[in-house]
Image (tube, rainbow, N blue to C red):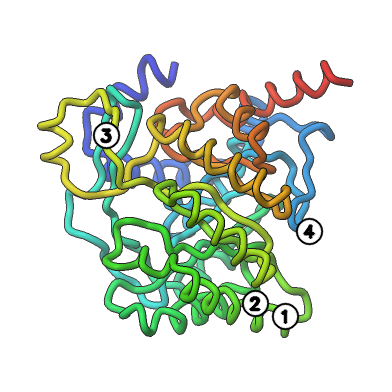
Amino acid sequence: MYKTFIRPLFFIFPPETVHSFVAESLRFFFKIPGIAGLVRTFTTIESPLLEREVFGLKFKNPVGIAAGFDKQAIMYNELANLGFGFVEVGTFTPFGQPGNPKPRLFRLPDDQALINRMGFNNIGVVKAVKNLKKRNTSIVIGGNIGKNTATPNSDALSDYEYCFRQLFDYVDYFVVNVSCPNISHLRELQDQESLTKILGRLQEINYLQKKPKPILLKVSPDLNNQQLDEVIMIVEKTKIAGVVATNTSISRENLKTQQDKIKSTGNGGLSGLPLKDRSTEVIKYLAQHSGKAFPIIGVGGIFTPEDAIEKINAGADLVQVYTGFIYEGPMIAKKINQKIIALKSEIS
């Protein structure tokens, strides 16, 4: 029904308009008494075979929503009713910012992909905390943090530290985002010295807390093997909890969409099916070359249960969807979880 009727209707309108409509619709719909429970009967599956304990947190199932879908922390409670085991909100910056000029989100239906150059548009971490205080779900909530566009890289640490302190009591884990291609010069912070400084300082603050929280690093699919080796060394040195692999890509290779349309779309991060193989390669490389020394959240090109299983077999402990959720619809988490149960049942 979703792919036959709803998605074609949605795809008539600009993607950012649809995203806002969906957010408001979810919030309105789930306020109706009894709706949340009814929806869960169709979208949610629970089983001990799905439960995971990863970086000290208990997950009802390993399928989550990636950062960027709920940028303002306004629909994580509603998304929890669609069968997901966790939701990552953000990216948040110290001060609210409008992001890049519109249009900044584009569909590539022939490739089952998206290109976005949103630019960390968000309401700011203080207002986000007000929304997170309305939490009424028991699923795990992650907080993705970044720097304001106007903040020079030399001062980036203060932005990450501010967001970390503000969010600490309201999320279960953190993801440090230095790999988004839509913020000028942000990816320069992926170098070993800058990353070690940022992650090391956040860990210092973390260890001073009564109960430290997991900190993860989100990495780019565009890193080469040497840079991935550096990621492994940084994780070992700073003792952060793990890695999210991967973010969006600046690559435009092997796309089916006509080149003139791609060129007219302009800069931005590519997500969706074209990232499937590369994100799996990054997951596999990090897992193998670290000796599976740390947990990995796998994200990039997950559309089917088989895609998710491929990520898990490559070394991912958890998986996240974003573009696949948009193209496949609200049953995606349940379908993946059913496949995981089926495979575990066969083994046992």
Above or below, 94 relative to 287 = below
Amino acid type assigned to the residue bearing label 1 in the image: Tyr
Residue 107 is marked as 3
Residue sitting at 27 percent across and 77 percent down?
Answer: 150
Residue 203 is marked as 2
Residue sitting at 77 percent across and 74 percent down?
Answer: 211
The residue that label 4 is drawn on is 56
Contact (Cβ within 8 Å) of mark 2 with mark 1: yes
Residue sitting at 47 percent across and 56 percent down?
Answer: 74
> Most extreme residue toward the right, as rendered?
348
The residue that label 1 is drawn on is 207
Q: CA distance from mark 4 to mark 3?
A: 37 Å
Amino acid type assigned to the residue bearing label 3 in the image: Arg
Considering depth in this image, is 167 or 146 the residue closer to the camera? 146
Q: CA distance from mark 2 to mark 4?
A: 16 Å
Contact (Cβ within 8 Å) of mark 3 with mark 1: no
